[in-house]
Image: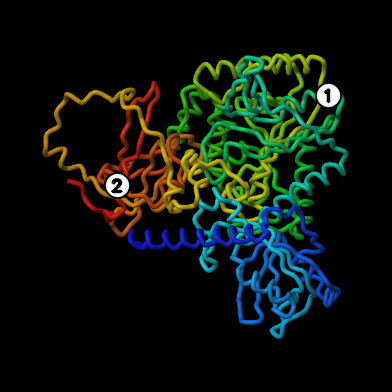
Amino acid sequence: MTRQQNNVQEQDVNQLRKVRREKLAELQTNGKDPFKITKYDVTCHAADIKDHYEEMEGKHVSVAGRVMQKRVMGKASFCNVLDQSGNIQSYVARDGIGEEAYKEFKKLDIGDIVGIEGEVFKTKTGEISIHASAVKLLSKSLQILPEKFHGLTNTDTRYRQRYVDLIMNPEVRDTFIKRSHIISAIRRYLDSQGFLEVETPMLVSNAGGAAARPFETHFNALGEDFKLRISLELYLKRLIVGGLEKVYEIGRVFRNEGLDTRHNPEFTLMELYQAYTDYNGMMDLTENLYRHVAQEVLGTTTITYNGVEMDLGKPFERITMVDAVKKYAGVDWNEVKTTEDAKKLADEHHVEYEERHKKGDILSLFFEEFAEKHLIQPTFVTDHPIEISPLTKKKPDDPEYVERFEFFMNGWEMANAYSELNDPIDQRERFKDQEEQLAQGNDEANTTDEDFLNALEIGMPPTGGIGFGIDRMCMLLTDSAAIRDVLLFPTMKSQGAAKNAANNEAQSVAPAQTAAASAPALDLSKVKIEPLFEDMVDFETFSKSDFRAVKIEACEAVPKSKKLLKFTLNDGSDRKRTILSGIHEYYEPEELVGKTAIAITNLPPRKMMGIDSEGMLISAVYEYDGHEGLNLLMVDDQIPAGAKLY
């Protein structure tokens, strides 16, 4: 669409919004201000009428919802009203509601919220409808809904304006209704098994229980720094010490990490702990829970995700991590004796590792690289190396490994469970090792929690514990492609205060202007740039660098990387180009799709996280106020893909 067409469309929208405000002003002048209405008696919903038509036919009902369609035909009209359960048609005639009321009905806009009373009947075409005897405007819509045939499809707008998404896309509404039912089914199952639902702190002085970097905040009243919890574990185990034998919590946790299709920095976790059982008991509980929830919410234990069928009705596979690596990577870890041997194998198999990693860490990296993607059907991967499991009991017959499993479906980790470590002396040593890792640069390592150690010294019985990712469970059970599709309000990069301010104006600003992101201006006096190179590059060498305009067709976070974004680029050729760039700290993937960037396209491919990166995107890097700043170089979208820069 050209800029001129955009301007015309914006003017049209502004005029429509102006008309709606004028209609509201007229209503208020005539003493019919809809915003003064405080209640409306609803007797049933659209789905109730449609599902039980035989019982409802001829009955007087009242429904309320949003006008989604209106067809005015002289003395009689039809409108469709949307409530939480779905749409229902209403037949509105001048003789049925009165001449004055019919005039007011004709002035209603798409998006207005109304109450409709009348009798249930079927039209000549067989559509279940309400023959209206009264129509009441309950709330005036002053904005314009997306055009009905195209709906709301832009993902960034859908996530930011979920309220519009829920109105326009019935499948989205269905997903979130199912999510609510999933969580209710989990609660019912656990309550029936004798578990107690509890609540533990979100603000903590020591964020432990998982390998993750926490968010930090300051508590003014105490003059003390706190962290947002990354796990529910350590407080729930304190309750096991206190004698509550079966406890669970469903709540938000917060991890200061990147965003991708399976990760959001705040997400819903369920953890439960049961005294006098172990990780085998947690496996049995997981199988039974998943079957119960699928059957109750979906009516079947066979689910389909992205076209792949998964059977929750069969016994779940159980395989050790060592056997999984042997099966899918062809490496027998029982023959790996030292960390040096493990690193040599990693080099041979192109598995990236850090200098601090030990033999068990590298086993885990092999598993992630070669095995995870094959675990489509429900699978328990058991007996993890001790290096990656600081809160887990050692296996009595092999202390290099612990009694832990991760539950996988669709190649995703869905749950993580332990035979919980209850030896306070061993636990202190594990915390000590974590502190050493923290000092070596592992910002996801735990720190020592003295109060938790004190609780263990009081005495904790043998205990099994597990953590479930509720969001991923909802993704699988609703066939949703990304975690943001099952979070009502996913974390998004702020668009700045300007948009909120503009929305409070008299709607005189064009929608495209109000939606534009407004990044704060840099104080250039605080900017430091890298000194210019003194070494000269001869012109012939430089001229061999092929700088091209590239269109960003897709962008996603690279799994297991906090920094890398993977770009799929149109470089003007017949094939798509893949380039990886470590700019996730500065950009979210969705805000770059559709942009035009600049890349060097004739560099040799470079392997990053096992992916060939075919070139380099150009960014401007500088220091600002003591921190590194970065801007991806983006140019006018009028420049075609493949245009060469000279």
Camera-side residue of 562 and 406: 562
Q: Can see residue 627?
A: yes
Q: Residue at x 74, y 74 (%)?
A: 132
Task: Identify residue type, mark 1.
Answer: Pro
Task: Identify residue type, mark 2.
Answer: Val
Camera-side residue of 317 and 628: 628
Q: Residue at x 79, y 49 (%)?
A: 185
Which quarter of the image is occupied by the N terminus?
bottom left
Q: Residue at x 80, y 60 (%)?
A: 41
Rendered location of residue 287, percent (x, y) = 76, 47
Q: Residue furthest bottom?
A: 124
Left/right of residue 646 with respect to residue 21 in the rendered view: left
Rendered location of residue 516, percent (x, y) = 43, 47
**How many neighbours does mark 1 have within 10 angstroms: few (below 14), some (14-19), or many (20 or more)?**
some
Camera-side residue of 79 and 619: 79
Instruction: Classify 210 as above or below 579.
Output: above
Left/right of residue 498 with respect to residue 195 in the rendered view: left
Can you identify the residue that label 1 sits on? 461
Secondary element under disc 1, as helix, strand or loop, is: loop
Can you identify the residue that label 2 sits on? 635
Instruction: Classify 89 as above or below 220.
Output: below
Q: Looking at the image, how many numbered discs can be counted on the residues? A: 2
